[in-house]
Image (cartoon, rainbow, N blue to C red):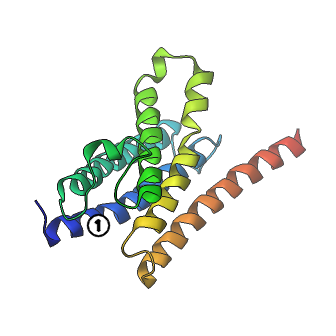
């Protein structure tokens, strides 16, 4: 089964997935702060972060299925999970598989968060950062639109959003430490 529809679906879900993963990472970074803004209850931050992450997982599923189902390029179903041995652009595909594996581990442990030690959950959840970065590199390497101007703008904005959120979080921690 192949055709331009699957190719467009795979491209579109890849871009939307990048934006959703970035939004989830940014929300996660900012929701870990003690205060986000006036009038924003703490539970709202967590709920929005979780819902964006679930939407991201849904988009990831569509992205992987559309890549595997499209027979124009030989991507076998296990290539989505095993980071080596892929026939089509093995390095970039392997990075995508690694990002998927990390993301699945994060999702499973988040679903089981109340049943595991908080420290263990936190260590696994911190894999969100490398998962996002690896997914970013995967898209830059294998994405067919990676050199298009609009794609470079989207990628740059996603990187900037994570850097700014990280700077705000670290800066807030430094200010709190200095005050203490």
Tell me, yes or no, if residue 126 can be seen here: yes
The structure residue drawn at horizontal position 38% and vertical position 76%, both measured from the top left corner, is 145
Q: In this rendered view, identify the residue nearer to me: 136 or 115.
A: 136
Residue 96 placement (x, y as % from top left): 43, 52
- In this view, the residue in front, 92 or 18, is 92
Instruction: Give the camera-side residue of 98 and 54.
Output: 98
Q: Position of residue 39 (x, y in %)?
A: 53, 47
The C terminus lies in quadrant: top right
Residue marked by disc 1 = 12
Query: How many numbered discs, if any?
Result: 1
Task: Name which residue lies at 59% across and 67% down.
Answer: 160
Q: Residue 152, how many percent across, how many down?
A: 49, 77
Residue at position x 36%, y 73% in the image: 144
Would you say residue 39 is visible in this rendering? no
Q: Residue at x 64, y 61 (%)?
A: 163
Q: Residue furthest bottom?
A: 149
Front-lying residue, 61 or 162? 61
Q: Quadrant of residue 53?
A: top left
Q: Residues within 10 Å of mark 1 (few under 14, many from 20)?
A: some
Q: Position of residue 161 (x, y in %)?
A: 57, 63
Please state if 106 lies on the left or on the right of 164 as rendered: left
Element carrying mark 1: helix
Q: Going by the image, does 91 lie left or right of 86?
A: right
Within the image, what quadrant is residue 32 found in? top right
**Residue 66 left/right relative to 153:** left
The residue sitting at the left extreme is 1
């Amino acid at each position: 089964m192949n055709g331009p529809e699957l190719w467009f679906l795979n491209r579109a879900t890849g871009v939307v997935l990048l934006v959703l993963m970035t939004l989830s990472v940014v929300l996660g970074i900012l929701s870990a702060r003690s205060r986000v803004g006036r009038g924003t209850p703490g539970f709202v931050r967590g709920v929005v972060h979780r819902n964006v992450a679930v939407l991201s997982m849904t988009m990831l599923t569509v992205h992987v299925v559309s890549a595997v189902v499209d027979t124009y390029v030989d991507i076998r179903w296990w290539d989505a999970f095993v980071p080596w041995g892929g026939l089509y652009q093995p390095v970039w595909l392997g990075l995508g598989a690694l990002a998927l594996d990390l993301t699945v581990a994060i999702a499973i442990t988040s679903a089981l968060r109340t049943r595991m030690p908080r420290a263990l959950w936190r260590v696994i959840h911190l894999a969100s950062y490398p998962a996002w970065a690896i997914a970013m590199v995967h898209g830059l390497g294998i994405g067919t639109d990676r050199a298009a101007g609009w794609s470079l703008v989207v990628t740059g904005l996603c990187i900037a959003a994570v850097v700014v959120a990280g700077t705000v979080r670290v800066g807030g921690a430094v200010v709190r430490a200095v005050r203490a």
